[in-house]
Image (cartoon, rainbow, N blue to C red):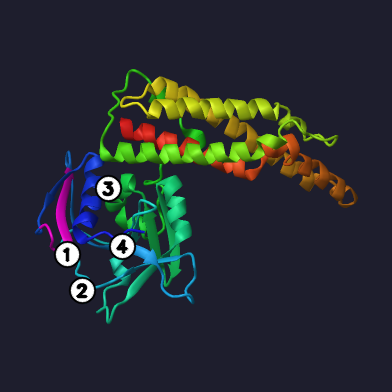
Amino acid sequence: MARLGKTKLFARIVSAIEADGWSVTLSSQPKEHPLRFTMTKGQAAHKVRAYIWNLTHGGGSKRPQHEQRIQITKVSQFEPEPEGTTLILGWADAANIFAGFDIGHHTRPLGSSPSIQIGAGALDQAALAGIAIQPKGNREVAVAVRPDRLAAYIGHFEEAHAGRIDAILVPQADAVDFNTLASPEHSHHFGNAAEQAQRRSVLDRLTALEREIEAIRPQLGMMGHNQPPEAMAPDPALLAGEITDAAATIRAELAEQQPDVAAVARGASALQRIWKMLRAARGEAGKFAGAVKDKAREKAAEIVAGAVIGGGAIYGPQIITALEATVAAIGQWFHLLL
């Protein structure tokens, strides 16, 4: 994983904020750390002091594999920004995610080569939802945030580090109305850094979804005598084909400089509809298995298992998760166009 120098790390901060429609005026020298600036948008303004380091694995073999950390160098004590916000950030270049830490829990002299940690799980969750939190004990809350939500994180800094992130989360996948987002009444803007980065993220999600579909394709149509609950009636092979077709349409449009947003919306709506149906069907199967009497539980388990093997593998959690991630990523791409 590449380690970026301070100039490039500063650029990640500034470009993320500017891509969200804010103007950034530096009040520190280009190579001076911490980076200091004022961000403005309409009548809103924030003074910011930003410390930043690369986010890397937490150390030697005795450290947990999921642990990520910033190793603090050349700073003996964090200084708060007068009448402003002080950020302590890590940047995970491979994941394209910032980690944020609360200066309120790091006010003392830092000592020799200290580090501050966050879990990789929070980074993964932020990649989907835009932001995620990780309680660390002593009431400290670490935050993982996608670049497109960095400005919102700054604006809601205290709430985020108190564990309240509803105002920063991107819309949930089942709440996105793609037809409205693609309406000709809206102006759609392509080509800025955030849009291009999210476009790549959508393509990555499509690749992951297509990989999951290909993994179960040999099993489609091989349902045994144990049939799944009635909620799982649609033909699995047809659903897989519809997913593949929708993914191909979206991929082809995102390869264009100015995609046809209506075509993307139709493909995304199809994926969203199938995801909701599969999720509901799997939920009904779970309720069915849990409702039977103890003596029949083993038989019920066989029936529910029939829903996730053979042709019913399309109802498996890996397909449902991949669909949700893809729909959420496309929804965020649309929001960046507006």
Mark 3 to mark 4 CA distance (whole Å):
19 Å
Between disc 2 and disc 3, the foreground one is: 2
- Disc on the earlier residue, 2 or 4: 4
SS category of the residue bearing label 1: loop
Q: Amino acid at mark 4?
A: Asn
Secondary-structure class at tag 3: helix
Region rendered in magenta: 30-40
Q: Which residue is mark 4?
A: 54
Instruction: Locate residue 298, reporting x and y percent.
Output: 86, 50
Labels 3 and 4: the sequence-earlier one: 4
Mark 2 sits on what residue?
A: 74
At label 2, the amino acid type is Lys
* Residue located beneath label 3 in the image: 151
- Quarter where residue 239 is shown: top right
Left or right of 38 in this view: 195: right
Residue 235 horizontal side relative to residue 130, left or right: right
Identify which residue, 130 or 215, lies in the foreground: 215
Mark linked to residue 33: 1
Separation (CA) of disc 1 from disc 4: 14 Å
Residue type highlighted by circle 3: Ala
Residue with the most extreme top position: 184
Residue drawn at point x = 64 percent, y = 35 percent: 278
